[in-house]
Image (cartoon, rainbow, N blue to C red):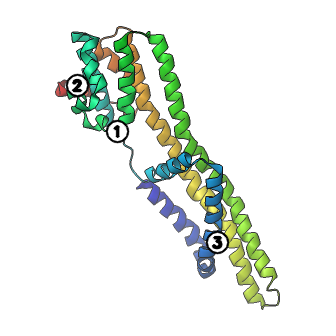
Amino acid sequence: MFVIIGFVISMVCIFGVFIGHGGNIGVVLAALPFELTTILGAALGAFLINNQMKVVKASAKGLASCFKGSRYTKARYMELMALQFDILQKARKEGLMAIEQDVETPEQSALFKKYPTISADHHVVEFITDYLRMMVSGNLNAHEIESLMDAEIETHHQEAHAPVAAIARLAGGLPAFGIVAAVLGVVNTMGSVGQPPAVLGAMIGSALVGTFLGILLAYGVFEPLGGLMDQKVEESGKEFECIKTTLLASMQGYAPATAIEFGRKVLFSDVRPNFIELEAHVKGKK
């Protein structure tokens, strides 16, 4: 919602001031379809050349997510930590082997079924179960698992940032494509030098619309969307950090209630439940 509001404010201020100063919006509108086709078409072609298909698909998905609200809410994090508490509590009371079936088939586990929001995210479920499986096997110590977790989180971070970087490069190239469109317009104008001044003036004005659109699309559309995608990537990484911190605290001998407190502390302040909220939620699920 705020993304759309931001775009509306930008466009109203830009074009409103232009019209208010007596600008002929008709010239801009007449040139708009051709200039947009030139700029966006060239930018799309370059984008496809510059990126692997997996990055192209991830970029499209990332741009679409900019128009949706964040799924990383306080309620989601409370579910995540309550799930971890239940698993660690069961392991503490009945032994690590008691959670083996939950880890191997989480889709059939009663513990995971209690938390449908987390269970629906296969990336999170896979991250949790992979490291719980290592804990059950007992072959790795806390330092080794921490190193492996860091490597996996870093890989996730790199993959998630690839579309962000791709959109940043696209935004950086749009002004140049705007100049390309403007130059073509000037070339077209040079071929009509015998026309009356009023006609030539309109043609030059249309050519300059290309430069204007290239800059506007770069700094008014794709650069802000790329920045928002970057923030969403950082937000998604916090979930894995929470899981990592909680499981490592448990491996170091802390009780489940204390382990999830470790995990709670790494969350961003706007979605971090306080101690009382989390305790009440965990008890309610029990």
The mark nearer the N terminus, 2 or 3, is 3
Question: Closest to the observer: 268 or 217?
Answer: 217
Task: Determine whether 142 is above or below 86 in the image.
Answer: above
**Closer mark to the observer between disc 1 and disc 3:** 3
Residue 73 image label: 1
**What residue appears at the point 46 percent right and 33 percent down from the top-left corner?**
237
**What residue appears at the point 27 percent right and 13 percent down from the top-left corner?**
97
**Mark 2 and mark 3 residues within 8 Å of each other at the beta carbon:** no
x and y percentages locating residue 159 in the rendered image:
54, 37
Residue at image mark 2: 282
Task: Determine whether 243 is above or below 2 in the image.
Answer: above
**Mark 2 and mark 1 residues within 8 Å of each other at the beta carbon:** no
Residue at image mark 3: 35
- On the rendered image, what quadrant is the C terminus found in? top left
**What residue appears at the point 58 percent right and 67 percent down from the top-left corner?**
14
* Amino acid type shown at disc 1: Thr
> Residue 91 appears in which quarter of the rendering?
top left
* Amino acid type shown at disc 2: Val
Residue 255 image label: none
Question: Closest to the observer: 252 or 279?
Answer: 252
**Closer mark to the observer between disc 2 and disc 3:** 3
Task: Determine whether 189 is above or below 64 in the image.
Answer: below
Residues under labels 2 and 3: Cα distance? Answer: 57 Å
